Image: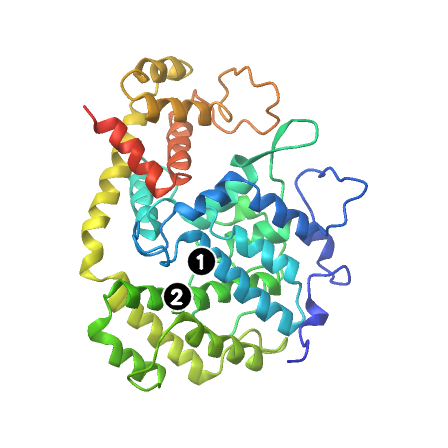
Amino acid sequence: MDLKFSSVSATPSNPKWNNLISREDELYKKVNDVRSEFERDYDRIIYCNAFRRLKHKTQVFFLPKNDHICTRIEHVNNVDATSYTIAKALGLNTNLTRAISVSHDIGHSPFGHKGESVLNNICLENDLEPFWHERNGLNFVDNIELLTNTNNEEKNLNLTYAVRDGIISHCGEIDENSIKPRTEFINLEKDYKKSNQYLPYTWEGCVVKISDKISYLGRDIEDAISMGILDKNLNELCDLLEVPNNSNLNNTSIIGDLIYDLCNNSSVENGLRFSDKMYEKIKLLKEFNYKYIYLHKCMKPSERYFKLVLTEIFTTLSNCYDGMNTSARLNELKSFYPKAIDSFIKWISCYWNIPTDRTNLKNKIIYDMNNRKDYLRAIITYISGMTDSYAIETYNDIVKY
């Protein structure tokens, strides 16, 4: 492969460069720091707690006993590897694709997309803005996640615009077999109203967007085969992939051809694209996955359980609202629900306007306890950061009586 996208890579020669590396606040820098701006972002992401929790969040299959079934953090690493391969082959900035990749799903709720749907329904029932994980991811890196700096101060991640844009722009279906980055430098927090509203601002962000699809298509099939839910449909899958019926189907055999086809058929003029034949195969693969994996009847019982767990946590915490006296109301319940309440108080006290003795906190105050909707939004954000197992532990703490 030639480096045919090198002229539009996210480098200092790119006309967008100053926008790409812009941050909300100036970021401290050590004299001997050898990292680029995007490498610094990568490190800030992998050391934050929200990234660490991805290892215990559902990708497709809930709490699998098989250690080799994909979790959310493994999916993120798969996207990182896929986007790195594509970006390197095309001459794009691999440091940027890596930073976007490891952070792109940081806003996912417990229990995967089904958990996301439950939280969205709760939001709509309480007259809150819809919940979508891309927006939530931007909120986490902008406002929620805290790192301790060299002055022992806890501050927000303060990532570059290019990475923040890649997070909120990564999802949504690719409806046309060609994508190019947008030209507008928009306000990501104010202008983004719904998922997939805009294409990414960089070619690197577009690579991650496509790599996300490439990564989950093959891996979800491999996991479903391991779980035994595709036993009756393997011949149909082999026919779809145009391989012998006795083939050993796995993620590697599926995504390798997709990566090569994308790199071979893409150009700056025509955008990132697959051959027409491969694009049709991708659509058929997606239809297969939805029919035989995501909508399989074995998924239904756990979906009902997810709704029960997340709704009960939200209801218990929301009933504690009492304006600026909410802290006292929460503390009254600690003796009944020590795990559920104590953890929530420690979390929300970093962000609400009720006075705290944590003088090293230098992040923004984002929840006004005079506003009930602010409190409800805080609960949604708190729940969204939970791992599957922690959400279940919290629920069990509430219903133990």
The label on residue 219 is: 2
Residue at image coords 65%, 58%: 95
The type of residue carrying mark 2 is Arg
The amino acid beneath tag 1 is His
Sequence-first disc among 1 and 2: 1
Q: Quadrant of the C terminus?
A: top left
- The CA distance from mark 1 to mark 2 is 8 Å
- Element type at marker 1? helix
**Relative image position of residue 133 (x, y in whole percent):** 42, 48
In the rendered image, residue 222, in percent from the top left (x then y), is placed at 35, 68
The residue indicated by pointer 1 is 75
SS at mark 2 in the image: helix
Report the front residue among 25 and 41. 41
Toward which corner of the image does residue 374 lie, by quadrant?
top left
- Residues at discs 1 and 2 in contact (Cβ within 8 Å): yes
Percent of width and height locating residue 73: 45, 52
Task: Please name the residue shown 39% across and 53% down the image.
Answer: 71
Q: Is residue 53 above or below residue 316?
A: below
Q: Left or right? Give the position of 228 relative to 24.
A: left
- Image quarter (top left, top right, bottom left or bottom right) of the N terminus: bottom right
Q: Above or below — where is 135 with respect to 311?
A: below
Residue in the image at 50% along x and 50% along y: 192
